[in-house]
Image (spheres, rainbow, N blue to C red):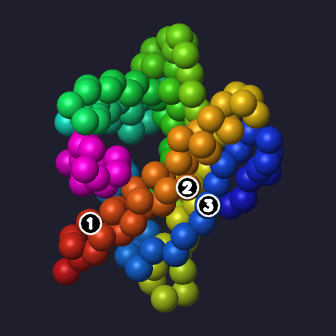
Amino acid sequence: MTLDLDPETDLSFTRTLAVPRQLVWECWTEPKHIPHFFIPAPHKVTSVDIDLRVGGRFNTTFDVEGNSMDNKGVYLEVVPGEKLVFTDTYTEGWKPAAEPFMTAILILSDTADGGTSYTAIARHRSPEARKTHEEMGFFDGWGTVVTQLEGYAKGLMP
């Protein structure tokens, strides 16, 4: 599964994780797992509300240095075990967000050794928004998240 990336508005990376794809999927789609990896430590996820369906909510609240940050979004595409697309452009009920930031796309596939090929894409409305996200630390932040995800998921393996 590939997507045409626009270098002007998209940021992306692919990593190979030493955990099975189904476990990565469960971590991304079951609320109990999200707090263990979804924001770079020492920041924390303090609440998660998932309705895993197209149009369903993907809401999180972060604690960043004592500040509470609400993130509300919806799923645009859900392909079980393979692809998640969610955005903050809308909230549940297709209500437009006042200041949308991006659409996230996660693509998962099996590797020959039983691991997961993990591709994360952040799509932005403009080259300026993309640049802002990159300067905010997209690669370090999202890279940290996937490292935390892999470590957490390894701990769930039998």
Given the image, on which type of amino acid does mark 2 rest? Phe
Q: What stretch is highlighted in magenta?
A: 30-45
Say which of marks 2 and 3 sits in front: 2
Label 1, label 2: how far apart the Cα atoms are: 20 Å
42 or 75, which lies in front? 42
Disc ID at residue 13 = 3
Q: Which of marks 1 and 2 is nearer the N terminus?
A: 2
Given the image, on which type of amino acid does mark 1 rest? Tyr
**Does the image show residue 105?**
no
Q: Which of marks 2 and 3 is nearer the N terminus?
A: 3
Residue 112 drawn above or below residue 84: below
Determine the residue positioned at 26% across, 66% down. Answer: 152
Determine the residue positioned at 45% across, 79% down. Answer: 115
Q: For the residue carrying disc 1, how many other residues have a C-alpha within 10 Å: few (<14), some (14-19), or many (20+)?
A: some
Determine the residue positioned at 53% across, 65% down. Answer: 118
Q: What element carries label 1?
A: helix
Q: What is the x, y in percent for residue 83?
A: 54, 53
Q: What is the x, y in percent for residue 91?
A: 45, 19
Given the image, on which type of amino acid does mark 3 rest? Phe
- Label pair 2/3, CB-CB below 8 angstroms: yes
Disc ID at residue 139 = 2
Q: For the residue carrying disc 3, how many other residues have a C-alpha within 10 Å: few (<14), some (14-19), or many (20+)?
A: few
| Pointer 1 residue | 152
Q: Which of marks 3 and 1 is nearer the N terminus?
A: 3
